[in-house]
Amino acid sequence: MPNDAVVTAPLQAWRYCRWFLRQIATQFRDDGCTAAAAALTFTTMIAVVPFVAIIYRILSLLPEFDGVGDKITSFVFETFLPGSSDAVLEKVLEFSAKANELTLVGIGVVFVTTMLMLMRMEESFNRIWHVANTRAGLTRFLSYWGIISFGVPMIGVAVTAASYDGIADLAELRGSALMDVLREAVPPIATALTFTFLYYGVPSCRVRFPHALVGGVVTTILLAVAKEAFARVVPLFQNDLVYGAFAALPLFVMGLYLVWVMILVGAICARTLSLIPWEDEPDGVPAAIKCARVLALLHNAHLDGGAVTDADILRAVPMTRTERARIFDVLNAGRWLRPTSAKTWALGRGLSSMTLWELFLALPDDIAEENLGGDSAVEERFRAFLADGAVHLDVTLDKLNASHVHPKDAPTD
């Protein structure tokens, strides 16, 4: 037994990793993440200057972060868009540095543009988390404001700590091994925490913090790999010969698109961690019994005034993807299942209007005695059904044929 456990654990881990990667690829395709990344790229190109202007405006209210705006913008471009030209960064800094000179109308336009970018991000995340209902107006506004108000200073602290130029109290530690380690470690940690904050706060549903943290770490690793790849690939392109003064624009757009692709992949990772893996092979339990178990789960949740998620259903009733599709088709056709929100289900009708026989006719699987090992009332009924059926069918075919022979065709002595 111990050896079996040792062998089983790596096998289960391998199956989970295979399922996890397959789930990411499937969800990336089914949720239209390529189109979402393109839409976010377009929105970001419009909102990048206003968003950086918001950063300058917020940091101008905090004397401790005077002059950090340029560092944050450079940090963002170097980390997220390493292939973009210095000319793009220079113009963004030039335009955004004038944030303190904006009028009220200008501030309003900048704020609205930034809100539109966050709304587009929320829509993409909600599609990944399969959220049907978004937040209400005030709650939505406060969540956006929280992202801007707390996210920007957090990055500012991280960038300042990474550069350690503004830390006078630690001047004697400059050049030490400890500060070198901090300077290398703080930027990726700040990046991971930023994405963790996005995955945790932007979707209009509850996201567990450990799942959001894993998504943030995955996105940070992907960005680090992409940064190295960009550094090697960008010099191979001779864009100046084709685009001239606009040579930085194609690389900027391509880098921005890849960044959003990686952000969405990190979001899918965070969401997939909350799912229960599908069974690879059917376990032989008839679909009618599994459907009855799902209805019992919905009924108990209804009595408690609640609903159940897909994870609750798969945890209580293990099934393959095909079995789940068949069972849910029957439940939806009979209006026994009612969606309430993202991956949350409630009982749609009372169980008094359905019989076990009707359920069996809807899901007429092969029912065998060896697959009825449970002690529930449903299994007892099916065992009785098999026993009674055996009594009625325990007759040879010649007797059945003899009982239907016409009198004139009957053999004579």
Image (cartoon, grey):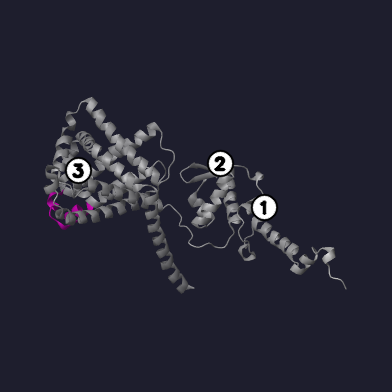
Marker count (numbered): 3
Which residue is outermost to the right?
A: 413
Q: Earlier in the sequence, mark 2 or mark 3?
A: 3
Q: Position of residue 380 (x, y in %)?
A: 67, 58
Looking at numbered disc 1 in the image, what kind of residue is underneath it? Trp
Residue indicated by mark 1: 357
**Quick check: is 356 in the magenta stretch?**
no
Q: Is residue 322 above or below residue 169?
A: below
Q: Earlier in the sequence, mark 1 or mark 2?
A: 2
Q: Residue 252 bears which disc, if any? A: none
> How would you rate the neighbour count of disc 3 (Cα within 10 Å): few for under 14, some for 14-19, many for 20 or more?
many
> How would you rate the neighbour count of disc 1 (Cα within 10 Å): few for under 14, some for 14-19, many for 20 or more?
few
Secondary element at tag 2: loop
Q: Where's the C terminus, which quadrant?
A: bottom right
Q: Which residues are magenta?
A: 170-186
Q: Nearer the viewer, residue 64 or 288?
A: 288
> Could you tell me if the residues under marks 3 and 1 are in contact, i.e. CB atoms within 8 Å?
no
Cα separation, mark 1 vs mark 2, equals 28 Å
**Quick check: is 176 in the magenta stretch?**
yes
> How would you rate the neighbour count of disc 2 (Cα within 10 Å): few for under 14, some for 14-19, many for 20 or more?
few
Cα separation, mark 2 vs mark 3, equals 48 Å
Looking at numbered disc 3 in the image, what kind of residue is underneath it? Ile
Residue at 75% over, 64% down: 391
Q: Is 70 on the left-hand or right-hand side of 292?
A: left
Residue indicated by mark 3: 72
Q: Residue 305 bears which disc, if any? A: 2
Looking at numbered disc 2 in the image, what kind of residue is underneath it? Gly
